[in-house]
Image (spheres, rainbow, N blue to C red):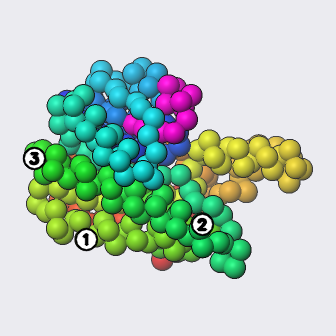
Amino acid sequence: MDLELDGNAALCTAATSGLGLASAEALAANGADVAVCGRTPEHVAAARDDLESIGDGDVLAVEADITDPDQIEALVEETVDSFGGLDHVVTSAGGPAPGPFMETTEREWYSAYDLLVMSAVWTTRAAYPYLRDSEAGTIVNITSRSVREVIDDLVLSNAVRRAVIGLMKTQAREFAPEVRVNAVLPGEHETPRIEELIEAGVERGEYDSYEEGLESWCTAPLGRVGQPEELGEVVAFLSSGRSSYVTGAALPVDGGSMRS
């Protein structure tokens, strides 16, 4: 299916690895010009090379800290200057510190709020004027299935990410009809982060092999862990005109693992 994204300009935050990068790859593969940011120079360079090898569109990959509003504003302006406009925004962020409630510090709560919520606020606020002027403006927030069902020992993700859904729902109403706003709720995907955790478990003797460790992560009725590109394709679809009557939706991409 042609998503008709040729020549569109997309910005994906915190997208030099994992599900953010997979989303940027899907947009690039469908012909969009894509900008990404990350904090590690090596990851930024690798993402640039990767995206340039995928599609025919232009690529912008820069170092930026999404918890710094000045850097986010500069990123949006650089994207617009490079591509001549902005049609799509995908907000992504790394996971906050794990842990149960009583072991989570006040500082970790504030840091998680900046990382997960304020980064989306700052990005969409800076991008909105350009998305409003686009004929195809969209925002897609990558969150987690934890916004629907809590996950043990992830109190920050469970509690703080839900604010992103409230933000999305509000923006979907306030920004309509010019800009559509949706969210995806990923379950387990075989990202570099999960790979690292499994490999560490193998080294500790918790698993006999990587394959055993990967199987232990699976909670989905489909019987496997998702691949990042499967999430990326959903993000690209929600960014495209093919989903033109979809806004305010929080779409699980979890292989059916949620029971709610």
Placement of 233 over or under 257, stated as above or below: above
User: Is residue 217 visible to the viewer in this orientation of the structure?
Assistant: yes
94 or 187: nearer the viewer = 94
- Among numbered discs 1 and 3, the one appearing first in the sequence: 3
- State the separation of the CA atoms marked 1 and 3: 19 Å
- Among numbered discs 2 and 3, the one appearing first in the sequence: 2
Which residue is identified by label 3?
133
9 or 105: nearer the viewer = 105
Question: Which residue range is magenta in the image?
Answer: 36-46
Residue 95: % across, % down: 56, 56
Identify the secondary structure beneath mark 3. Answer: helix
Q: Residue at x 32, y 33 (%)?
A: 34
Residue 29: % across, % down: 35, 30
- Among numbered discs 2 and 1, the one appearing first in the sequence: 2
In the rendered image, residue 43 lying in the magenta stretch gets the answer yes
* Residue type marked 2: Glu
Placement of 39 over or under 165, stated as above or below: above
Which residue is identified by label 2?
108
